[in-house]
Amino acid sequence: MPTILSHPAVPLTIALGLGQRVIPVRLLIAGVIASILPDLDVVGLHLGVDYASALGHRGFSHSLLFAAFIALAAGAFASELHTTRRVASVFIFASAASHGLLDMLTNGGLGVALWWPASNERLFFPWQPVEVSPLSLQRFLSSAGLAVLKSELVWVWLPAAVVCAALAMLSRRHEP
């Protein structure tokens, strides 16, 4: 998996690219949380949940259905997020769904149950350039963690910066 430091790249990119008028700060914070939330499933590993289980790491919480449920909840709280139901739902769906998609770019683990519950198959993209992050803090604080951060800088943050700049240019073009 990319680290919890890099999963927020997608909501940050969208929000910074489109600006506060489209993505208010409260919605951005909710998007960052939604982008990290699927990794709460690692708690299950410490409770004896099998990694390959639907409840295991990269299981149901990494699915598009899970992202859709979070998006529906965000839509219900749109006024508290200072936006419309549609904007809240679409932004939170993109933020949560991006988690599993980024994990599918990594070169380790069992893959992502993207289509759960329709399928329990764990998927990766054919191209997996992102170094998988170790699940233990001790291993992350070693040279392996540094390799992961370098990989994320190149394969997550650099493309995010390019997309952010493009979004900013396009959104400024369409301002009244």
Image (cartoon, rainbow, N blue to C red):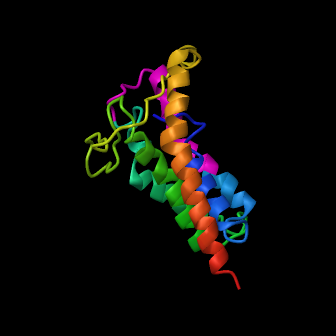
Q: Mostly what secondary structure, the magenta segment?
A: helix
Identify which residue is drawn at 46% across, 59% down: 68
Q: Nearer the viewer, residue 55 or 153?
A: 153
On the image, the x and y values in percent for residue 65 come to 40, 55
Which picture quadrant has residue 168? Answer: bottom right
Q: What residue is shown at x 41% (from left), y 48% (from top)?
A: 101
Q: Which residue is rendered at x = 32% and y = 30% of the image?
A: 52
x%, y% of residue 142? 56, 14
Asked whether 108 or 89 is in front, the reply is: 108
Which portion, as a residue range, is magenta? 32-53
* Name of the residue lying farthest toward the bottom: 176
The question of residue 140 being in magenta is answered with no
Q: Residue at x 25, y 41 (%)?
A: 121
Residue 126 shown left or right of residue 104 in the figure:
left
Q: Residue 67, percent across and down?
A: 47, 54
The quarter holding residue 92 reads: bottom right
Quarter the N terminus occupies: top left
Answer left or right for 100 relative to 35: left
Residue 52 among magenta residues:
yes
Q: Quadrant of the C terminus?
A: bottom right
- Left or right for 128, reference 171: left
Residue 19 position by quadrant: bottom right
Q: Could you tell me if residue 88 is visible in this image?
A: no
- In the image: residue 55, left or right of residue 27: left
